[in-house]
Amino acid sequence: MQDSMINEQVADLAKAMLALESEEEAYRFFEDIFTIHELQAVAQRLAVARLLQKKVTYQEIAERTGASTATISRVNRCLTYGAGGYQLILGKTKFGDETSEDNP
């Protein structure tokens, strides 16, 4: 992560997230810390990253997630030139619809 992005507050947030022990705890924390819009925006970016990694087209990603092409492009830049965070979490996490062959 860029040193300019890390400060004590960001470090504390990372530690807080690492302290969560279950999905239920995560939901409770997210409900308190994020607005609905913020939470949906972050979740949408993760969905976009997953679809980009599976080589889904921008048009289909926009249709499936409701993300703007600007958001899709930003996430794609992060996947290509970023710190590797999306790849890290996508490699460690299975999502609900990944068992379906027709739902990339």
Image (spheres, grey):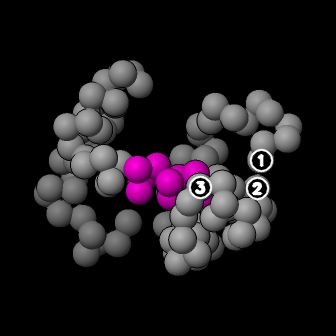
Q: Amino acid at mark 3?
A: Thr
User: Which residue is tagged 3?
Assistant: 65
Residue at the image position 22 percent from the left and 53 percent from the top = 11
Q: Dots 1 and 3: beta carbons under 8 Å?
A: no
Asked if residue 68 lies in the magenta stretch, the reply is no
Disc on the earlier residue, 1 or 3: 3
Q: CA distance from mark 2 to mark 1?
A: 7 Å
Could you tell me which secondary element the residue under label 2 belongs to?
loop
Q: Dots 2 and 1: beta carbons under 8 Å?
A: yes
Q: Which residues are magenta?
A: 40-48
Which of labels 2 and 1 is toward the front? 1
Residue at the image position 21 percent from the left and 43 percent from the top = 33
Q: Residues within 10 Å of mark 3 (few under 14, many from 20)?
A: some
From this viewpoint, is residue 4 visible? yes
Q: Position of residue 91 (x, y in %)?
A: 63, 45
User: Which residue is tagged 2?
Assistant: 54
Disc ID at residue 96: none
Which of labels 1 and 3 is toward the front? 3
Q: Amino acid at mark 2?
A: Lys
Residue at the image position 76 percent from the left and 67 percent from the top = 57
Image quarter (top left, top right, bottom left or bottom right) of the N terminus: bottom left
Asked if residue 42 lies in the magenta stretch, the reply is yes
Q: Position of residue 87 (x, y in %)?
A: 60, 55
Disc on the earlier residue, 3 or 2: 2
Disc ID at residue 104: 1
Q: Amino acid at mark 1?
A: Pro
Could you tell me which secondary element the residue under label 1 belongs to?
loop
Q: Residues within 10 Å of mark 2 (few under 14, many from 20)?
A: few
From this viewpoint, is residue 81 visible? no
Q: CA distance from mark 3 to mark 2?
A: 14 Å
Q: Position of residue 47 (x, y in %)?
A: 58, 51
